[in-house]
Amino acid sequence: MTSRPLKRSLHRITVVATCVVALAAPAAAQDQAKIDAGEAIYNDYCFTCHGEKLVSSGQTFDLRRLTAADRARFENSVLAGKNQMPPWRGVLSSEQIDLLWQFIRANAHQK
């Protein structure tokens, strides 16, 4: 037989766990929505050179190699251009660049 204090503790743990799961689900769905939006932007502006689903043909930089620490480098390259890549300043908004980054990071080799 389980004691009353133990039952209350188990009930509290169950309630807390349920709340954590309920709160995490919308965040995960929101993150996936950002990733999907980033993929759409990538397909509109980037895939021609950087490859379908980020798989480079080897002629351009493989964006999947970017690490979390490369965010500033990524933004600078997108805004100012680099080598054969034209600058996208004035074409892509900071929100669109952020969504692109979400898509790239979700598919990166190193999470």
Image (spheres, grey):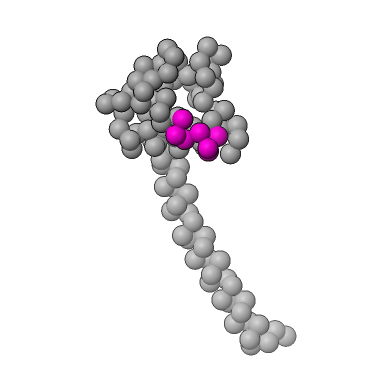
Is residue 97 placed above or below 9 in the rendered structure? above
Q: Quadrant of the C terminus?
A: top right
Is residue 69 placed above or below 91 in the rendered structure? below
How far from the left and from the top, in percent, is residue 17?
A: 56, 66
Q: Is residue 56 visible?
A: yes
How far from the left and from the top, in percent, is residue 8?
A: 59, 82
**Residue lying at the far bottom of the rendered structure:** 4
Asked which quadrant contains residue 90, the reply is: top left
The mark total stands at 0
Classify residue 65 as left or right of residue 79.
right
Q: Residue at x 54, y 30 (%)?
A: 66
User: In the depicted view, which residue is nearer to us: 72 or 6?
Assistant: 72
Q: Residue at x 50, y 15 (%)?
A: 60
User: In the depicted view, which residue is nearer to us: 65 or 17?
Assistant: 65
Q: Residue at x 56, y 14 (%)?
A: 58
**Residue lying at the far right of the rendered structure:** 1
Highlighted range, magenta: 67-73
Name the dominant secondary structure of the magenta segment.
Answer: helix
Q: Quadrant of the N terminus?
A: bottom right
Asked which quadrant contains residue 98, the reply is: top left
Asked which quadrant contains residue 38, the reply is: top left
How far from the left and from the top, in percent, is residue 49?
A: 45, 15
How far from the left and from the top, in percent, is residue 6?
A: 66, 82
Q: Residue at x 46, y 30 (%)?
A: 73
Q: Is residue 103 visible?
A: no
